[in-house]
Amino acid sequence: MLQSIIISILLNSVCHTYGVAIIDDCPTIENGDNLSQTQLLDRLTHGCRYDRLERPLTYTEDGSRLPVDVYMRAYIYFMQNLEAHDLQFKIFALLQMRYLDPRLNFRHVSPKRLQPILGEEQLRDSLWMPHIFLANERDSSILGTSEKDILTSISPDGTVIVSTRIKATLYCWLNLKKFPFDEQHCSTVLESWMYNTSELVLHWEQKRPITYDPALHLTEFLLKQSWSNETVINADLSDLRHGAFAGNYSSLSFTVHLTRVVGFYLMDYFLPSMLIVAISWVSFWLQADQAPPRITLGTSTLLTFITLASAQGKTLPKVSYIKVSEVWFLGCTIFIFGSMVEFAFVNSIWRRKHNVPIKKLNSKHILKSTLSPHLLRRRSHTRSRSFSGSGRPMDTNLLGNGNLPFNNYLTVNLPIQTIPEGQVVTRPAAPNRRPSLHMLSSTNRKLDVTFVESAFSTAAAPAAAASASSIPNIELTDVNGFNNNNNITEEIDHEEEIANTGWTTLTPQEIAIWIDRRARFIFPLAFLVFNLFFWTFVYCI
């Protein structure tokens, strides 16, 4: 009996002791005005009345739970230029979020305390925080030390404001089709990580949600404008950005509109490329047979421009579409390459040995005759021979053993004398003969006309010698030069007959000079038209 009484007394004493301890573990928050700020915060966030892993709960009149409204504000005080090759940009910003937590309301327990309670990282770690992340970040960190760059404020009504200075490297897809005259739109996206829209909703502040430091300046871009947006992200099991949790998540974003400043590219790329193209046109003022200087000028300008363009393109990503800068590069390369092709063309014409028959002295007929000289020479030569052969009948006595007659005469206004076989006579051109354009342009040139007539009987040789002695200014040449003189005779006959039929001839040198003179105007004019279309597309389309 005595033993049972002792046990009951011990049990009552133990229960009384632990009951008082349990009551003492939840400190009272009454008379908060007499408590220090640290003591008040310790009692407000004590485990018996505050769970930092549970979000603040608010209810409607019918008892349903409401999501937590989190209001965001961003202050951008530094923004680094876009890195085109990495498709990213850096920002240094102050992010501020504000929400209401009724559990931290101390207005009734400490009515005399009107100022908010301020703290740093330690205070933030003792509170519930909405988990918000940068959806398009590649790297982010808190600037400075954690004690310095995190500011936490608790107002008497339970409003919590947390400000954090961050540095973030963000992904930005660049549209470089009009580079370097492009405009870019880069966004910063904030999303809720743990709580879907039924638990947490993000909002931008009503007044000035995004502000920029007045001293903010970019070296390569000009900040035109910015705007903010609120949206909802639908995440499913295939989208692991929010883990393995499907649902709708609140999202905030602000976008900056950046315009590239083209002064650097105009001075370092476009103007030098224009000058390089213009330098390649200097070859049009050099004579067509000056191959070494013209080749050196063409290749050096082409290699210089390729080096200039490749240095500019190293800073850009390799994209699948064509950029405006590549169109400019291709156009300038075509003009420089065209000047080299023009030199090869006029140089090949300069080295021709035969004159070119021209029907009319205009660009169409000159180019047509130049591109197909052999066909025109053959046709003109056919007309010349038929015209010469119709002047006198065929001598049947010269047919011999069925051989065709040899056309050994020219259509000239001088009597044709017979000379002995094996000798060639040469005389200057007749003064009353119609000159060609080639003869007019070369006044000091002596035109040697050579024609041969074969004697088939040895008895006619003395008479032929006597007749030959009566011809003035006759030079006798050896029979070994007969073939060359015969070719010259046919060429002179061809030119004279062209002049008689209304055609004219140009020397290859005259045609080459004519092409160079036209190129001096055609190339700059074509480059001007190219610039007109290019800059119209850049600034008007």
Image (tube, rainbow, N blue to C red):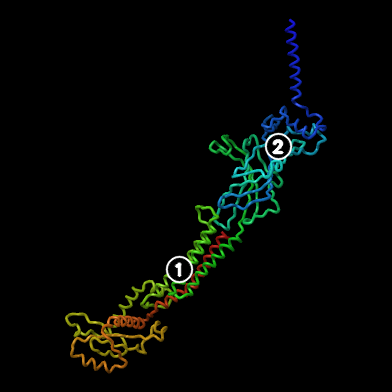
Q: Is residue 443 left or right of residue 128?
A: left
The spot of residue 450 in percent (x, y) is 30, 85
Q: In the image shown, does 533 or 194 lie closer to the viewer?
A: 194
Q: Which residue type does callout 1 highlight?
A: Met
Q: Is residue 514 left or right of residue 88?
A: left
Q: CA distance from mark 2 to mark 1?
A: 73 Å
Can residue 386 be seen by looking at this rendering? Answer: no
Q: In the image shown, does 47 or 185 lie closer to the viewer?
A: 47
Residue extending farthest to the left is: 401
Q: Is the C-beta separation of discs 2 and 1 under 8 Å?
A: no
Q: Which residue type does callout 2 highlight?
A: Arg
Task: Determine which of the numbered discs, if any, sits on residue 447 in the image.
Answer: none
The spot of residue 393 in percent (x, y) is 24, 85
Can residue 451 be seen by looking at this rendering? Answer: yes
Question: Above or below — where is 144 with respect to 286?
Answer: above
Q: Earlier in the sequence, mark 2 or mark 1?
A: 2
The spot of residue 9 in percent (x, y) is 75, 11
- Under circle 2, the secondary element is helix
Q: In the rendered image, which residue does mark 1 sit on?
A: 340
Question: Which residue is at 76% across, 15% downward?
Answer: 13
Q: Is residue 480 left or right of residue 346?
A: left
Q: In the rendered image, which residue does mark 2 sit on?
A: 124
Answer with the quarter of the image where residue 127 lies.
top right
- Classify mark 2: residues with Cα within 10 Å, few (<14), some (14-19) or many (20+): some
- Classify mark 1: residues with Cα within 10 Å, few (<14), some (14-19) or many (20+): many
